[in-house]
Amino acid sequence: SQTIHQWPATLVQPVGSPLSLECTVEGTSNPNLYWYRQAAGRGLQLLFYSVGIGQISSEVPQNLSASRPQDRQFILSSKKLLLSDSGFYLCAWSVGGLFTEAFFGQGTRLTVV
Amino acid sequence: AQTVTQSQPEMSVQEAETVTLSCTYDTSESDYYLFWYKQPPSRQMILVIRQEAYKQQNATENRFSVNFQKAAKSFSLKISDSQLGDAAMYFCAYRSQGGSEKLVFGKGTKLTVNP
């Protein structure tokens, strides 16, 4: 069966420090991968999505970046965190071209101090 | 660009009653998918129901059903016989079919179920 792993669950980082959040999917090939951010009590803002290795679409220009070095690995990064980067980050995957829903990781709560 | 709008930030319903959550979307595509997700306090995203745009028949999953109006670009969720466990954030989502595979969510509706 397919599973998605997202870590860490909680992260506290100082302003100006780098960030690396990792998401991996097991049990499927060539998934679509997504990164979302959810501010407290708010909706899911699509940050990046990828339909294949090295293919990244950015939805919101900001100091975050994403990479997909392997088929089932999706990484969210920042060189220098801002206070406004605090939030709940969710990784998700779906099967491309088929009518299936997206499956979500457990999320990472990032607090920038 | 595709956008999803949920005009009701909060809704409340009495236990055992029926409630309808609204969702509208904007797209120029003809083929796409629509979803409703539930996010309880645990913050785990749970699929409630899904609909293919080419299907005119409204999807139903037990107590959950949708009213899909393609021409009006409307996709509302009806919860019948509401239960305390239905209390959560509900998100409407749009996914492109083929090509971009972009998945966009609305801002959510917080549903409270009163005993």
Image: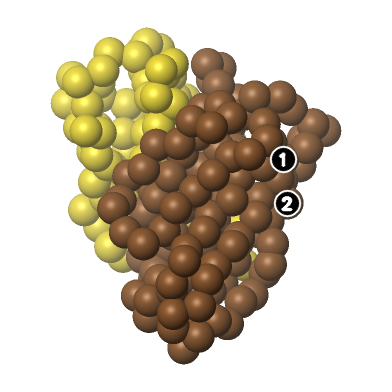
Looking at the picture, the colour scheme in use is: by chain
For the residues bearing labels 1 and 2, Cβ distance under 8 angstroms:
yes
- Image coords of residue B18 (percent x, y): 40, 50
Q: Which residue position is annotated with label 1?
A: A25
Circle 1 chain: A
Evaluate whether residue B31 shows in this view: yes
**Residue farthest along the right direction in this orientation:** A1
Q: Quadrant of residue A92?
A: top right
- Colour-to-chain, yellow: B
Q: Is residue A40 or residue B53 the one in the foreground?
A: A40
Q: Secondary structure at mark 2?
A: strand
Q: Secondary structure at mark 1?
A: strand
- Colour-to-chain, brown: A
Which three-letter amino acid code belongs to the residue tagged 1?
Val
* Distance of label 1 from label 2 (alpha carbons): 6 Å
Q: Which residue position is annotated with label 2?
A: A5
**Residue farthest along the front direction in this orientation:** A79
Which quarter shows the N terminus of chain B? top left
Say which residue appears at 28% left-offset and 53% top-offset.
A61
- Image coords of residue A109 (percent x, y): 56, 72
